[in-house]
Amino acid sequence: MLYPSIDKILTKVDSKYLLVHAIAIRSKQMIEYNHFQMKESEYKNKKPLGRALEEIDKGLVTIVKNK
């Protein structure tokens, strides 16, 4: 089971599709650039997808929709 819960994060993001897209982009950035918003010891997840979820949950990643 993923931490944090997707249902919890959906209160901050408008749709599941936008959330999935943002998580995919952020996790690819983590892999490619080895850049993290928190110290590695502060993450509960070890994989980039879980870490991206944690960053979105803590408000460290802002999702901007194009108009």
Image (cartoon, rainbow, N blue to C red):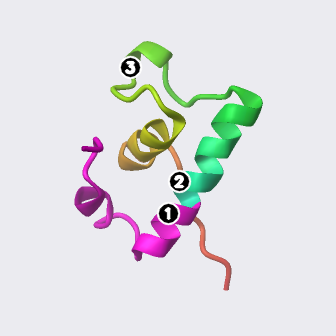
Asked if residue 19 lies in the magenta stretch, the reply is yes
- The secondary structure type at the circle numbered 2 is helix
The residue positioned farthest toward the bottom in the image shown: 67
**Spatial CA span between label 1 and label 3:** 23 Å
Please, is residue 58 above or below residue 65 in the view?
above
- The magenta span reads 1-21
Q: Position of residue 8 (x, y in %)?
A: 24, 57
Check disc 3 and report its element: helix, strand or loop: helix
Q: Disc 2 designates what residue?
A: 23
Amino acid type of the residue that numbered disc 1 sits on in the rendered structure: Val
User: In the image, 10: left or right of 18?
Assistant: left
- Under mark 2, the amino acid is Ile
The amino acid marked with disc number 3 is Glu
Q: Nearer the viewer's eye, disc 1 or disc 3? A: 1
Question: Can you identify the residue that label 3 sits on?
Answer: 42
Question: Which structural element holds mark 1?
Answer: helix
Earlier sequence position, callout 2 versus callout 3 = 2
Indicate the quadrant where residue 43 lies.
top left
Residue displayed at 51% across by 71% down: 18
Query: Residue 19 at what x, y percent from top left?
Result: 47, 64
Residue at the (61%, 47%) spot, across then down: 26
Q: Which residue in the structure is indicated by mark 1? A: 20
Question: Residue visible at 60% across and 67% down?
Answer: 64
Q: Is residue 62 visible to the viewer in this orientation of the structure?
A: no
